[in-house]
């Protein structure tokens, strides 16, 4: 079985990360009392996964680029060259395009890594996943409880679906772990949630400059109808025309939303082959 070697670039000080990646020989620096094999050598014929690659120091970015280009490296304190036959996967939660523009990340390394990019949307754009994740975490943390949590109420699920989730899935998991500890048993209700989750701030708030009234005036009912159409269409597009999820996103009763869609004659775009 091919090895899979992960390393978190943000969790290891930059002065130690080079040794972690490439290894070192005895006497290479203070405290190096014996030879040590690095992550690249451990990942030979397998995969090395760089988590938080955007936190890597500029000095190490240069050395990593060389490994990716030449498939070779030297342990710290050694002149011996070691081949590196590894697959590299990297992940980050920062905008590397912006980091490159600001001079914080090497452009050549960015393009060397960006061969097959996979962009994972934030949790706030995948509200349909929230019920599935909640059920998964409930089952996970029920294993350590004598009396299990049996589910989550619709009201609690609705407000969690409206929350912006800046911490993404990790934040959701931390919340569910907290609730598993505090909530002894039964169904998680809206009042079991911390205050910030019970009163989420809508990300689509309207300011006074959003709509301009022309000097000649405007038809109020027509404007409201057009804006309502735009909101419903946006919710449907975000959820892949899933009416249940769109209703949650808009905080509407599903029946009300279905009636509005039918009345307005809204239909999903036709796909062409």
Image (cartoon, rainbow, N blue to C red):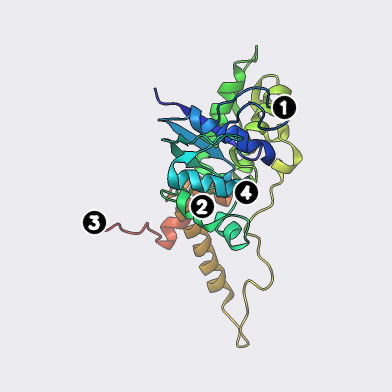
Q: Quadrant of residue 261?
A: bottom left
Callout 2: SS: helix
Q: Is 195 left, or right, of 243 in this rendering?
A: right
Q: Give whichever of discs 2 and 3 has the lower sequence position.
A: 2
Q: Which residue is mark 3?
A: 273
Q: Residue at x 62, y 74 (%)?
A: 211
Q: Residue at x 40, y 30 (%)?
A: 45
Q: Give whichever of discs 4 and 1 has the lower sequence position.
A: 1
Q: Quadrant of the C terminus?
A: bottom left
Q: Which residue is mark 2?
A: 109
Q: Dot 3, how many residues are within 10 Å of its Cα: few (below 14), some (14-19), or many (20+)?
A: few
Task: Give the image location of residue 111, x and y in percent.
Answer: 47, 55
- Estimate the spatial distance between the alpha carbons at disc 2 and disc 1, rounded to whole Å: 31 Å
Callout 3: SS: loop
Look at the numbered discs 4 and 1 and tell me whether their residues touch, using CB distance below 8 Å.
Answer: no
Q: Dot 2, how many residues are within 10 Å of its Cα: few (below 14), some (14-19), or many (20+)?
A: some
Q: Dot 1, how many residues are within 10 Å of its Cα: few (below 14), some (14-19), or many (20+)?
A: few
Question: Given the current orientation, which residue lies at the most extreme top position?
Answer: 146
Q: Which residue is mark 1?
A: 31
Residue 230: which numbered mark, if any?
none
Callout 1: SS: loop
Q: Give whichever of discs 3 and 1 has the lower sequence position.
A: 1
Q: Give whichever of discs 2 and 1 has the lower sequence position.
A: 1
Look at the numbered discs 2 and 1 and tell me whether their residues touch, using CB distance below 8 Å.
Answer: no
- Estimate the spatial distance between the alpha carbons at disc 3 and disc 4, rounded to whole Å: 49 Å
């Amino acid at each position: 079985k091919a090895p899979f070697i992960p390393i978190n670039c943000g969790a290891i000080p930059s002065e130690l990360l080079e040794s972690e990646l490439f290894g070192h020989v005895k006497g290479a620096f203070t405290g190096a009392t014996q030879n040590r094999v690095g992550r690249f050598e451990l990942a030979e014929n397998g995969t090395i996964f760089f988590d938080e690659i955007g936190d890597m120091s500029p000095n190490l970015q240069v050395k990593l680029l060389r490994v990716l280009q030449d498939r070779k490296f030297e342990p710290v304190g050694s002149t011996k060259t070691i081949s590196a036959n590894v697959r590299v996967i990297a992940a980050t939660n920062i905008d590397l395009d912006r980091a490159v523009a600001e001079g914080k990340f090497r452009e050549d390394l960015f393009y060397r890594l960006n061969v097959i990019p996979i962009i994972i949307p934030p949790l706030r754009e995948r509200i349909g996943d929230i019920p599935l994740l909640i059920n998964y975490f409930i089952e996970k943390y029920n294993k350590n409880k004598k009396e299990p949590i049996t589910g989550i109420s619709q009201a609690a699920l609705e407000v969690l679906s409206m929350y912006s989730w800046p911490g993404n899935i990790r934040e959701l998991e931390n919340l569910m772990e907290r609730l598993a500890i505090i909530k002894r048993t039964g169904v998680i209700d809206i009042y079991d949630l911390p205050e910030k989750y019970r009163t989420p701030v809508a990300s689509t708030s309207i300011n006074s400059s959003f709509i301009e009234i022309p000097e000649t005036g405007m038809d109020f009912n027509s404007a409201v109808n057009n804006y309502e159409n735009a909101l419903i269409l946006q919710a449907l597009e975000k959820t892949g025309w899933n009416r249940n999820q769109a209703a949650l996103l808009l905080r509407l009763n599903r029946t009300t939303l279905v009636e509005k869609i039918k009345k307005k004659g809204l239909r999903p775009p036709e796909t062409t082959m």
